[in-house]
Image (tube, rainbow, N blue to C red):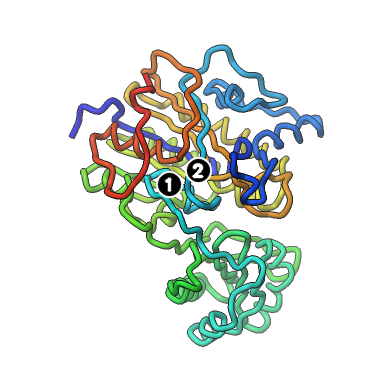
Amino acid sequence: MGNYRYNRIFTIVMDSLGIGPMPDSAQFGDEGADTLGHISEYFERVEENFRIPNLQKLGLANLKKLRQVSPTDVTQGYYMALNECSNGKDTMTGHWEMMGIHTKQPFITFTETGFPAELIAALEERCGKRVIGNKSASGTEILDELAEEEIATGAMIVYTSADSVLQICGNEETMGLDNLYKYCEIARELTMKPEWRVGRVIARPYVGKKKGEFVRTSNRHDYALKPSGPTVLNALKDAGLDVISVGKINDIFVGEGITESHHSKSSVYGMEQTIEIAKQNFTGLCYVNLVDFDALWGHRRNPLGYGKEIERFDEKLGTLMSLLREDDLLLITADHGNDPTYKGTDHTREQVPLLAYARSMREGGALPAQDTFAVIGATIAENFHVAMPDGTIGESILKELI
């Protein structure tokens, strides 16, 4: 161990911050999607200022033309676009690819039909609960529609989305968190069958007593599939390095390769946790997912809220950057798009940014677009002198970050 170019690497995923369509976006029904570009256009249209000075310094406006943010003559660090090579546009596919997994077979979705009657019957029998819902829906809308019935009758709200997910709502007072988590564990067990194999089962706890007052809480818990093979995270942990997760990273990887986990109640809180971690001594990776961009604003098709969330992130980013040491590397990226001005409420197949910054960098500027997110994991692996696990993909760009 030791003698690393960077002793600490902070990899921050701005969940769903796409920067424009990939060449194959039309095959996913996403031709013309542009999360960041359309947010910037919306801010101009409603005469709102869009202030992201720290992301601007890192080259985001050089990488992606924005209406209200100018490119900078000299960037702090390097910037490039990443294309996804895996077959999908969901959270797990994107994060797994970052750490070396090439997902060729997409996860099953039940958006159009709801879940099969056989699965619902098995879930009802195992949980002792009548299922209501069983359709694709917004999480807030389905609470307004069915939460009063759930509270009154003891039924269980089950729904899906455009993602490969089975979600169960539970009132924290009437159902209780422990029971909600137990029902989700049962659903995860049932959905391991190949024909029902969803990427994630998600517990969606909420509070409130009547329509208009229901609010989802931060006690969400994801029950994801175990990664299909070992990832860079496993290699780092096996080498005795720290792998610290913030947000839902631990859920996405089902704890695989994680040495320390921090649950976040919001993206702002996730950045505050990351700032505190930056004040501590460790050697290895701090891997952060900030989900509010996606969950609160992208899926709800709220470009103003999304943009304001980016501004809040940018403010916290300035604090984090001030704490970085000479031997730290900061990587900022995304896992897919979710254009809040686009049709439907689904993720969008888009390129994502990669911004790389270190105090020790002598140069900066544009680097060529890459054909996989896996350059991130490969770069981290090379920095810490660990071999990429068998079957993983990705080529390091560490030598470019000078």
Which quarter of the rendered picture does the C terminus lie within?
top left
Vertical arrangement, residue 63 with respect to residue 127, above or below: above
Q: Secondary structure at mark 2?
A: loop
Residue type for callout 2: Glu
288 lies above or below 68: below
Q: Which residue is mark 2?
A: 84
Measured as percent of width and height from the top left, residue 84 is found at: 50, 43
Q: Residue at x 47, y 58 (%)?
A: 105
Task: Write down the residue under mark 1.
Answer: 97
Q: Residues within 10 Å of mark 1 (few under 14, many from 20)?
A: many
Residue 30 versus residue 10: which sits nearer the camera? 30
The one of 1 and 144 positioned closer to us in this rendering: 1
What's the distance in space between the residues labelled 1 and 2, CA to CA? Answer: 8 Å
The residue that appears at 36% across and 43% down in the rendered structure is 393
The residue nearer to you, when weighing 382 against 77, is 382
Percent x, y of residue 40: 71, 32
Q: Is residue 274 visible?
A: yes
State the SS at label 1: helix
- In the displayed structure, does residue 138 sit left or right of residue 255? right
**CB under 8 Å between discs 1 and 2:** yes
Badge 2 crowding class, 10 Å Cα cut-off, few under 14, some 14 to 19, many 20 or more, is many
Looking at the rendered structure, the kind of residue marked 1 is Glu
Q: Among all residues in the image, which is located at the extreme right?
A: 46
Residue 324: % across, % down: 40, 26
Residue drawn at point x = 33 percent, y = 23 percent: 399
**Quadrant housing the N terminus:** top left
